[in-house]
Image (tube, rainbow, N blue to C red):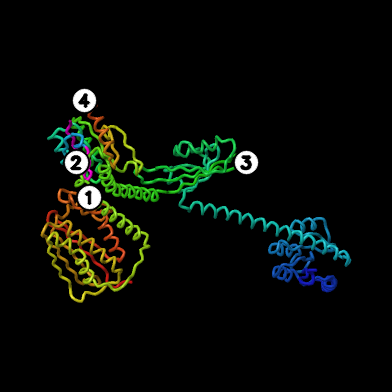
Amino acid sequence: MALIAIIDDDPDILDASSLVLKSKGHDVVTATNPKDGLKIITERKPNLIILDVMMDEPDDGFFLAQKLRRENIQTPILMYTSVSKAIGMDFNKSEMVPVDDFVEKPISPDELVAKVEALLNKVEEKR
Amino acid sequence: MSDEVKKDCILIVDDEKGLRIGTQRLLEDEGYEVETADCGEEGIRLGKSKEFDIAVIDLRMPDIDGLEVLKEIKNTFPNTICFIATAYASYETAIQSTRLGAFSYIPKPFTPEELIYQVELGIKQRKLILEALKLKQEREEQLLELASEKSRLNTIIKAISDGVLVINKNIELVYFNYAALRFLNIQDVKIGQSVVEKLPPEISEIIDKIIAKEKILLKTYTTQIEILPNNELIIEAACTPVPNPDGSLAGVVIILSNITQFKKIEQIKSQFVSMVAHELKTPLAAVQGFINIILNDSLGVDREKQKEYLSRSTVRLKSLTDLVNDLLDISRMELKTKQREIEDVDITEALKSTLQFLEFEIKKKEILIDTHIEENLPTIKADVSEITRLFTNLISNAIKYNKESGSIYIIAHQENNYVCIKIRDTGIGMKPEEKDRLFSEFYRAKNEKTRGISGTGLGLSIVKKIVESYYGKIEVESVFGYGTTFTIHLPINQN
């Protein structure tokens, strides 16, 4: 079982995601903004980070992802996006967005669980 | 035919009285109008006073020589047909007189038939001359018209704000106006010069395509070009082939329009659309997330938790409804299609009813309301629902962003031609950078203190639109951590 950090400014999304992941036996820590997010990541060293795009925040999710990589924190990141399809913006893994996978909101429990398991397995294999 | 209307006019200049009278009578009988002069001087005076069709001038006169008279008349009226009449006919005089412009030479004495025959020839000649003259004049006028038409077209094309550029199939410049050079950032070009190197690649590509086509298609090809970076100058180029009369390609006409403003508006619009999409999708995603969890049997969410998620979903849906209503209000205000009922609005009443409407929220947070409303405050002409909306948005913000058991001060008084309303709270206040963006759509101050306060991000933007629609103004002062004051001035006298 893994420790998963979820960072999203929507408390409802945090609760829903936590419930899904906890039901699969994972431990969950949450934060509602990038600043607190960085804090729980450095303090608790989770196995996986779920990070929302958080377009409303001055330092958004992309910014935090880049910062983590710069500080050489290589924990896999699963990014929550909400409007990429609506505004015709497609994200791809790249230098600009150093994340490992994307989940489009609204979250479907099965998809979330599948993507989380896949990323955790990948980390396991590398070891 | 025209004789009835206007007779041909003949001048007789002769010092011999008998000849004058005889000739006059003879020619008048033939239907001519005749005037006579008895000496050279009189001949010159008459001949210059109006244009005669024919002048018959005696060569030898006591005062002035007939050739001199001829010269003078011809000087003024070169188209008067002149005859020199003389008994002393000589080859030299004949040459000299024709050189000076005489049409012919009549030797004296002459028979009536001879004279009439000569005069008829002269009239014919004069008609030919006048006809030719008329044609020449017409042609000149036409040329003048053409020239002025061309220069008029030139002036029009030079003056239009769109750029016009015409090139031939060798991509040499045929025509241009200054707007075209300005848009394309081209300096120092002349007609006939090749502009291959000077055109932006987007245009060159289209021109190459047009030239490469075997058959001319009368189609316009357009492209948009960023001439200056950062959206400072964007133009649209419309390239249309120009055919020769035989259908082959003569060249290409390129019309350049400045679409910078249009592009900017488009950008603002799409930014707004993506903001709206984001704002709409956020609560939807939360609600759908909860529903997915409840429907997913494998998660085994208990009834209690299900109920909690459903009621949280209701809250999100309520906020979504508020957002949609705010958006509709904003769009109605921007389109000015909102039907207004303008009446005398009592500000005191409007403030009181707003406070009543918000009583529940005020009591829940134990907020103290302190009002100082001037007595007999003048009414303003407005739609009461908009004024109430304005106060509701401001006072509910003052409640939401206040501390527990805080205060709200409401001051209203007349200030010259305005009613001035101040709404002050003892809440969390704003940082200066937050204050600047306060009235923009979807902006919500975000800091450690605003977390957990819900809103559409449109409330103040609606407030500003209402105030401005009544030609009023709104100002905000704020100290972070201590509170915020909104000051509104609404004009009293207005239609």
Q: CA distance from mark 1 to mark 3?
A: 73 Å
Q: Position of residue A55 (x, y in %)?
A: 26, 44
The answer to the question of whether label 1 and label 4 lie on touching residues, with beta carbons closer than 8 A, is no
Residue B331 falls inside the magenta stretch: no
For the view shown, which residue lies furthest in the left direction?
A: B405
Secondary structure at badge 3 equals loop
Q: CA distance from mark 1 to mark 2?
A: 24 Å
Q: CA distance from mark 1 to mark 4?
A: 37 Å
Q: CA distance from mark 3 to mark 2?
A: 67 Å
Callout 1 amino acid: Arg
Image quarter hosting the N terminus of chain B? bottom right
Query: What numbered label is drawn on residue A124?
Result: 4
Callout 4 amino acid: Glu
Identify the mark nearer the N-term, 1 or 3: 3
Q: Which residue is mark 1?
A: B312
* Crowdedness near tag 3: few (<14), some (14–19) or many (≥20) residues, C-alpha within 10 Å: few
Query: What numbered label is drawn on residue B247?
Result: 3
Q: CA distance from mark 3 to mark 4?
A: 73 Å
Q: Chain of mark 1?
A: B
The answer to the question of whether label 1 and label 2 lie on touching residues, with beta carbons closer than 8 A, is no
- Extent of the magenta region: A1-20
Q: Chain of mark 2?
A: A
The relative height of residue B304 versus residue B478 in the rendered view (above or below) is above
Callout 3 amino acid: Gly
Front tag of 3 and 2: 2
Query: What numbered label is drawn on residue A34?
Result: 2
